[in-house]
Image: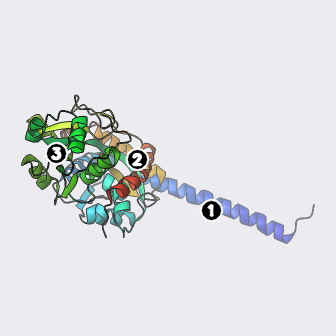
């Protein structure tokens, strides 16, 4: 068979391309093996001093010991976490810029904000889930005692027999407490007026003074009030019960189907970060989460989350993103 000049050039080109591809893959592998070669920036998209900031700094201390590189924690608050998250979405996908993402940023805000500047799935590479805790349906103690409300069904019955008399508090429009309240209304058909406040603390004050009768609050925040008997817990909002409130049923166990709203956060890199780097980060953060000091801090937040793989976290984030599309729509909340 006679080889034409075109065939020879085509074959040579294929060999060259194959060689370049192999070379590039080898270079990428070498780079991942050498990583990290400089400090890592860890963005917390909320204000300093909060629970995410506290755990991020504690994890950073442990991770830098393992990776032998400094982890610099930087607070970039604003727009419900969107500002800090956007800065990481636009960073180089090299593993040197991380963010403590959360349910609000990855699952709620994309459906809540009209002008979000990043794709919550494509622009981030999930590394590891750090914490997942339920919210808790709590009611004012005096209100509960006066009206014999000892269960979720009691609250639903009261609402149906006293239309227009029930108010519930939240930390603001589009907050987890607001979404949970509207989901409960949609699932049960009860009438309750939403009273938004500028944060969870003033919302709790309104509950304690009986200006509002119930609210959905973060477990870590509400647990001291529950243990002190200042409020009554009726149900937790996740599919699984929590060991921190062993006698409190889930919303589903108490009779409301398809009710699963939790508060979670975890570590993300920029989308497109090489898989070997993600795996290194996952290992480092897994080991950090198993540190006794970190475990103690997580338990104070009401979390008993165990380290998992990056793929498990990625699958979870995608499912949460889709789930909250319906929940935000039900709430009617929107932010420009």
Q: Is residue 168 above or below residue 299?
A: below
Q: Earlier in the sequence, mark 2 or mark 1?
A: 1
Q: Which residue is mark 2?
A: 280
Work out whether mark 2 precedes mark 3 in sequence or the reverse, and give the earlier one.
Answer: 3
Closest to the observer, 26 or 297:
297
Secondary structure found at label 2:
helix
- The residue at which mark 3 appears reads as 221
Residue displayed at 19% across by 47% down: 215
108 vs 282, nearest the viewer: 108
Q: Are marks 2 and 3 in contact (CB under 8 Å)?
A: no
What secondary structure is marked by label 1? helix
Picture residue at 20% right of the left edge, 50% below the top:
51
Q: Position of residue 250 (x, y in %)?
A: 29, 35
The percent position of residue 325, horizontal first and vertical second, equals: 40, 55
> Which corner quadrant holds the N terminus?
bottom right
| Res. 35 visible in picture | no
**Relative depth, front residue between 74 and 180:** 180
* Residue at (16% x, 45% y) in the render: 221
Q: Is residue 87 left or right of residue 276?
A: left
Callout 2: 10 Å neighbours few (<14), some, many (20+)? Answer: some
Q: Contact (CB < 8 A) between labels 2 and 1?
A: no
Mark 3: secondary structure:
helix
* 3 or 1: mark nearer the eye: 3
Q: Is residue 249 above or below residue 328?
A: above
Left or right: 233, with 249 as reference point: left
Residue shown at 17% from the left, 57% from the top? 199
Image depth: mark 2 or mark 3 in front: 3
The answer to which of 122 and 107 lies nearer the viewer is 107
Q: Which residue is mark 1?
A: 20
Distance between the alpha carbons at the discs numbered 2 and 1: 26 Å
């Amino acid at each position: 068979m006679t080889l034409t000049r075109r065939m020879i050039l085509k074959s040579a080109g294929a060999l060259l391309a194959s060689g370049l591809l192999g070379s590039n893959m080898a270079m990428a592998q070498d780079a991942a093996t050498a990583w990290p070669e400089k400090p890592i920036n860890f963005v917390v998209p909320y204000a300093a001093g909060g629970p995410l900031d506290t755990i991020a700094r504690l994890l950073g201390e442990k991770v830098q010991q393992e990776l032998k590189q400094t982890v610099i924690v930087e607070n970039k608050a604003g727009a419900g976490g969107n500002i800090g998250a956007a800065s990481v979405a636009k960073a180089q996908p090299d593993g040197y810029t991380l963010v403590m993402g959360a349910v609000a940023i990855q699952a709620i805000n994309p459906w809540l904000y009209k002008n979000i500047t990043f794709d919550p799935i494509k622009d981030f590479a999930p590394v590891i889930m750090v914490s997942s805790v339920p919210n808790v349906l709590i009611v004012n103690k005096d209100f509960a005692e006066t009206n014999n409300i000892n269960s979720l069904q009691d609250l639903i019955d009261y609402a149906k027999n006293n239309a227009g008399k029930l108010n519930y508090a939240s930390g603001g429009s589009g907050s987890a407490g607001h979404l949970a309240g509207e989901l409960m209304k949609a699932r049960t058909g009860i009438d309750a007026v939403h009273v938004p406040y500028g944060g969870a603390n003033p919302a709790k004050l309104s509950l304690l003074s009986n200006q509002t009768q119930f609210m959905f609050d973060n477990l870590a925040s509400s647990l001291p009030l529950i243990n002190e008997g200042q409020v009554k817990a009726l149900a937790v909002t996740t599919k699984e019960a929590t060991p921190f409130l062993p006698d409190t049923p889930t919303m589903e166990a108490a009779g409301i189907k398809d009710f699963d709203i939790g508060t979670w956060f975890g570590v993300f890199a920029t989308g497109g970060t090489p898989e070997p780097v993600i795996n290194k980060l996952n290992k480092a953060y897994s080991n950090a989460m198993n540190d006794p000091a970190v475990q103690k801090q997580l338990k104070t937040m009401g979390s008993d989350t165990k380290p998992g793989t990056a793929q498990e976290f990625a699958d979870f984030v995608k499912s949460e993103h889709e789930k909250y599309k319906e929940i935000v729509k039900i709430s009617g909340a929107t932010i420009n």
